[in-house]
Amino acid sequence: MKAQSKLYFYMIISTILLAIIAVWSVDTGVYDFGGQSAFEVLGKVIKGDPDLSLSDRYVVWDVRAARIIMAMLIGSMLAVSGTSLQGLFKNPLATGDLIGLTSGATLLAAIAIVLGGHFKEYLPEAIQFSLVGISAFIGSLLSMMLVYRISTSGGKTNVVMMLLTGVAITAIGFSITGFLIYISKDEQLRDLTFWNLGSLAAATWTKNIILAIVLVVAYIILLPKGKALNAMMLGEKDAQHLGINVEKLKKQIIIIVALMVGSCVAFSGTIGFVGLIVPYILRLLFKSNYVFILPLSAVCGSILLLTADTFSRSMVAPSELPIGILTALMGGPIFIAILVKFKKSL
Amino acid sequence: MKKFILAASVLVAVYSCKKTESATKENTTETTSETPKSNNKIVTLSGGITEIVSALGHEKEIVGTDVTSTYPASLKTTAKDLGHVRSMTIEPIMAVNPTLILASDKDINPELLGKIKSSGIKAEVFHQEYTVEGTKKLIADVAKAIGNTEYQKLTDKIDADLKQVQPLSKKPKVLFIYARGNMLMVAGKNTPMASLINLAGGENAVNDFEDFKPLTPEAVIKANPDVLFFFETGLQGAGGNEGALKMPGVSQTNAGKNKKIIAMDGGLVSGFGPRVGEAAVGLNKLLVESTK
């Protein structure tokens, strides 16, 4: 029970921190609300003030608030997917980016962007609308299955094999995306390159609703798995003895992570390293206790991505930095730190 | 940042004073045929459109432009540079409080277009064709959007300029190279450059693909251009004439052997706005000189 209240304490602290950052982010931007602060305007939007100008309403609600929520949703899902994979594979290097999920999702999304025009009209309307998203999900699921098949034999996952498979998938993804770049038009090319580094600029409430549904479904299944993941640390056999259905657990995590990474890539492009940075920091604080780090990574992922996005859109205003540049800048050193720390066990 | 906040708040203050006035004027533009200068606050997101709006005498109404809007140069001090349309986001556009956004369909990012549409600001997206007729239509369309009917003089000027194009005895094959950093692209069919080269009496050297493609040595040798054509900034970036001659394959071509390299201002060449005639005459002169 003591551990439980400790978890609540950290959850509350980090949620408050997230709220503070969100407030700072709402007030950050180049648009001027004519003497009012962004909060006043936001308050009026929520109250439904009829005197509020359409432009003010649009900027604070449809541009900034939508983007802030999207940063939180995507940051949270990327961090949780990293944490879950690391628990499943018992290795701190297992993240969606490094084992090729992001690359697989990116590849199929890129195919949908460049070639989608040729076959879109033959598809049902509901699929047309979310073609890029569905492709990204299939891409990440296929990569996940491939990585799992290649790196696992006799119920044991070889981490080096897993990372190398990730390298191979990333290479294949890179080359095919390169080919797509070659055959794409100038405009598509700019979209692809910009999109490869990730951006939350295209956030809308519709996308947020879709992401929120994915998040809720995923978290209902994943977040209570902390104990099971802790048991997995002992090895699959021991976990089985403790009454955990290891095969079922693996399947669930794999499918849910693919769904989360796929939908994040579809809406924001490739934002790397979030799934590496957040669990790494949490593990420094709480060791590998998944009862703690799984729910906390859901909140801390939001904190990280929201902070990065607020910087990305204010550092070089009125233009903005692709957010993937910032997260990679933070993630690179942490990657090296993990490598150094686990030098012997890899 | 502080300066910008100051500028933005001044703009807001000025705008709020003029708000009622502009609303009444906008209503009258539809009923009267003679159009006084409206009080639009315009954001133009394409170099060609910016030139048209300015040439129609509405330069002062432009409050924001994209990075390709380099002419007239005075705009750099009066209008905010919003960056490249591909990486632009909606908030900086809204920060200049425009009443009208004018863009071209050729380069606007679909996400941004969606955001512009849902922002509620009046916006017009024009289809741009890289021909003289297309330019004239664009001028008419833009003029209509900003409520000015006096555009005939602009289209007449294009015709007058084009009459100065001297016929060339032998059409030189011109290869346009778009050089930016390490990326070298050549212009195929249906590009503004190919169209301008034809207008100026030359022949585009590559016609087996559309748009821009990366440059390969073999393709350059196969195209065997008589003249290499660059943007001035591109040629500088590529190391001037010497750098251009060292590009893979170039030395094997007629252009390389005879050191025929020309360069023009990028905005003038690719804008396909009111200065299209001027651009064609300029290129024609360079071609005449280089074929002597």
Image: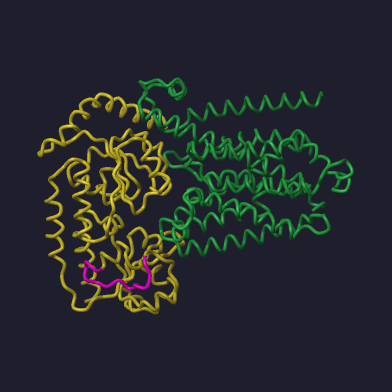
Image-quadrant location for residue B190: bottom left
Colour green, chain: A
Relative image position of residue B25 (x, y in whole percent): 18, 31
Colour yellow, chain: B
At a point 45% along the width and 72% down the height, the residue shown is: B216
At a point 57% along the width and 25% down the height, the residue shown is: A20
Q: Main secondary structure of the magenta part?
A: loop
Question: Looking at the image, how many numbered discs can be counted on the residues?
Answer: 0
Image-quadrant location for residue B245: bottom left
Report the front residue among B75 and A96.
A96
Relative image position of residue B179 (x, y in whole percent): 40, 62
Question: In the picture shown, does residue B102 fall above or below B236?
Answer: above
At a point 11% along the width and 36% down the height, the residue shown is: B32
**In the displayed structure, does residue A150 sit left or right of residue A305?**
right
At a point 51% along the width and 65% down the height, the residue shown is: A179
The image quadrant where one finds the N terminus of chain A is top right
**In the displayed structure, does residue A18 sit left or right of residue A132?**
right
Please say which color scheme the image uses: by chain
In magenta, the rendered stretch is B198-210
**In the displayed structure, does residue B158 sit left or right of residue A77?**
left
As for residue B203 lying within the magenta part, the answer is yes
- Asked if residue B78 can be seen in this view, the reply is no
Question: In the picture shown, does residue A64 fall above or below A13?
Answer: below
Report the front residue among A115 and A177.
A115
Relative image position of residue B75 (x, y in whole percent): 27, 43
As for residue A253 lying within the magenta part, the answer is no
Relative image position of residue B197 (x, y in whole percent): 26, 67
- Asked if residue A48 can be seen in this view, the reply is yes
